[in-house]
Image (spheres, rainbow, N blue to C red):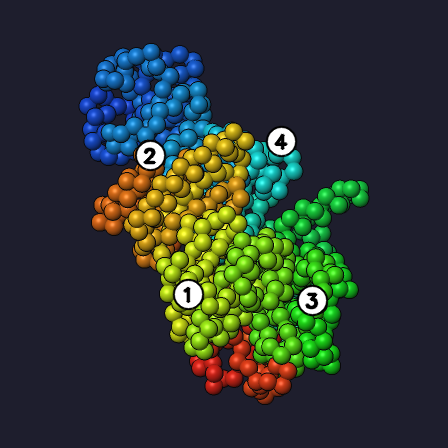
Amino acid sequence: MNRIKVKTYRPKYVRFLYLKHLLPSMAWAFCFLVFFLCIKTTPCVTANTSKLIDHTKTSFLEALQSGKTSFVYFGNQVNPTIRLFLEHLEKSADALEDYGILVAKVNCTKERVPKYCTGEKLMKKVYLFRGSDVLKNFDADTVFDVDAIVAHVLFAVLFNEVRYVQTPAELLSIERIAKGLADVVLAYVQILGLPEHRAVMEATFVYGTKYQFVLTTGGSVLKHMGVEDPSSLQSGLWFLHCKEVMRRSDPCHHTALKRPLTTLNIYTFLQLMEAPLVTETRMDPTEVETVHNRLRTPLLFLFTQAETLAVDRNTAETLAWRLRGEVGLALVHRDSPDVKTPQEYNAAYRLPAEGSAVKYFTLKNIEEVFSLFREEPVQDEEEDKEDEEDWAVLDVLDDEVAESVYRDRDLGLDLELILELTADTFNKAVTEYDHVVVLFFVKWDAVSMAFMQSYQDVAETLEGVAGVQLACVDCGEWTDVCSSEGVSAFPTVRVYRPGEPPQPYRGMLGAESLSNFIMLCHVPTPVLLPSEEKAWSFLGGELHQGHAALSPVRVLGLFGSSPDSGRGMFEEAARLLRGETVLGLFSETQTQKWAEDYSVTLPAILLSRGPGTHIEPYSLHLSTVEEMAADIRKAVLDSFPELTVENLPSYLELGKPLLLLFVGDEGDEEEEEEEGARQYEAVRGELRSLQGTGRLDSYLPCWIHLGRTPSGRAVLESYLGSVPMLPALVLSQLSTGREVFQYPPEQPLLSEGILQWLQRVEKKEEQPAGVISDEKWGPPVPFYDFLSIMDQEAPGYAAQKSPKLKISGREVEEEGLDKEGISGDGRTLNHKLPKSQLGPRPPHQHNEL
């Protein structure tokens, strides 16, 4: 499994860079002092301080035994070409000494070193040793000058710390591994061995322990990074902010280096990336000193006051992301007595020139900022449009949902098919229709607004379906309605029927999932089946045939005619399962015969997965309605499922190790697809045979098709570090040790071999192929408690009263909330429950207003 490599800093080289780049004035002073002393005293004598070592056979062998890294050239004659190469080799010796690498040459005319002073390749090869091992050998034409030598040698030495990518998929794989662990530095050079390559490798040597460095030589990676014309770019560097990204689904925001690729520019750029995004200060701008002053970078000041602090912070952060790497940004609290800026100005800036004064101005438009720091030639309208698109690429928020809502902020939603309910119309609406689907949302929540588009699509899909009406309530406007309904998570969807408690929707926030749920809710549950003929028709899919595509699984409950048969409990459980699957009820006198035919005891269920499939019988235990519903949910699950994004949570709840078979691929040709299908069927047959013996009861055999579920590729890469030949069988122990084991790819996937492999894993005789990191998927931003701020300004103003949770005049208990008020599916919580129910308040998961 690929991991972020860790190594120690090289303190000598760090000091060298510090003196070289941070203290230019001190360096010049030191040089002047040396020159002055040479003039005033005896003439300075320049000694031969060449670091190039002339090895004898004995000293060469001793160097190999020392374990040091050395770069050695073997030759037996000198011509003009070789003489020029030796000059560069000598210069590189001084440069490579900073990295602890020795540079040497061996005169094979005098010293006959076995293996290296013989053969046709003599004088054409240069060898890089680590101790007695050859790390790599280079053609002399490849290491043609000092830059090429240093670049190639460091690239070889740091081979495990620099990843080389050719495709966007490879880069995305590195990003996924780095999220939450380290930031990524992506460098592009046209050809290896150029000065730009050397600059990148020198930066890697110093910062490789802090960042994951990635190198590319162009191709589709550049277009992936937003470069429209890769041929026009000679070199480039991007900083991918992945360390603070805790969820693999979130993107890594990236910042581009806008200067030439030199050691000094890279060093300065990385220092700027480590600087705070926004510096808040209560000092006057003339007194503010930040890292940007030391790095000779412009500094922009924005002024704020207590009343607009939250808005100003958001503006400053948005602007800082667009200027990052070019301009620093400081937010100045105007209410501080140390700030002397007149009220007429709301912004200021200071250029990096020595002695530059702070200049104050009134900022009316955010775009005005960029003209202060960029000299832009006159452009026509088409070029201006291209610039706006470039900035749009850079203006990416950390939260993809928030970003999409922000970009579509000017697009109006057509709510003609959706009833917009108020406090006056809510109660009437939920009793007027057979099925009223209500979306509770708030306009300031990005997830709510993103889901609103899907909700509109559902309304269009279900237009004309009798008895179904979609509605919505803006809880920002009608807080009394949402409080009385006990809504505290946004967005929340519920289905209301006259005379019944509302049913919450807990599925995925997508149009297709919600539409299927609503249509299944429209089916009577359970379907009462008065005869054997009707029962068989139900299991065969003939009844409610139009809903087969929504849920091919049919569950038939078998109950006796006695009052304590459990029929009533099943009917209640069926209501809890409404919208998930189709359930039928058969409780005639023939049920006992059916139970005997299928070798189960009453009460029981018969499960059909579609026409022509095997009927699966299960006995039911009469305990509680909730437990019966849970048992039915488990029975509905497939014994050898295809994992998808939608059904994965249901199977993870079983808590079993996943025996995962990866098949297919996104780019399969038709012939390869057919071959993959044959291989899959063969392996599936082997696993099915093991399931029949009960030997896999402690595992969950399942499979993922990478063509239908592309995210499966990311799963496989995170497990093994790369995508092996398919099909691949992997054991993932998520609930125990988080270790991942891969079935030996060189062995055929046969039942006995699979069983023996699992036994070796259980006995700890197999080495894991990877370990899944225990990531914490926290919120993208820290909780911002607006209510507490309001209370600071006006004590008691924002105090919350305990709401009574009532629906149509009846008090109910909100389902799906834990005692902290966090919904089971992680949706936003915006209304507090009484403190007596909450206990100690934990850190909030989302903005609360």
Instruction: Specify whether 790 is left or right of 587.
Output: right
Marks 2/3 in contact by CB < 8 Å: the verdict is no
Marks 2/4 in contact by CB < 8 Å: the verdict is no
Marks 1/3 in contact by CB < 8 Å: the verdict is no
Q: CA distance from mark 1 to mark 3?
A: 39 Å
**Residue 784's x, y, as percent?**
55, 72
Label 1, on which residue? Answer: 592
Dot 3, crowdedness within 10 Å: few (<14), some or many (≥20)? some
Label 3, on which residue? Answer: 468
Marks 4/1 in contact by CB < 8 Å: the verdict is no
Q: CA distance from mark 2 to mark 3?
A: 54 Å
Label 4, on which residue? Answer: 231
Label 2, on which residue? Answer: 748
| Closer to viewer: mark 2 or mark 3 | 3
Instruction: Specify whether 670 is left or right of 127.
Output: right
**Residue 348 visible at all:** no
**Residue 657's x, y, as percent?**
35, 54
535 or 238, nearer to the observer = 535
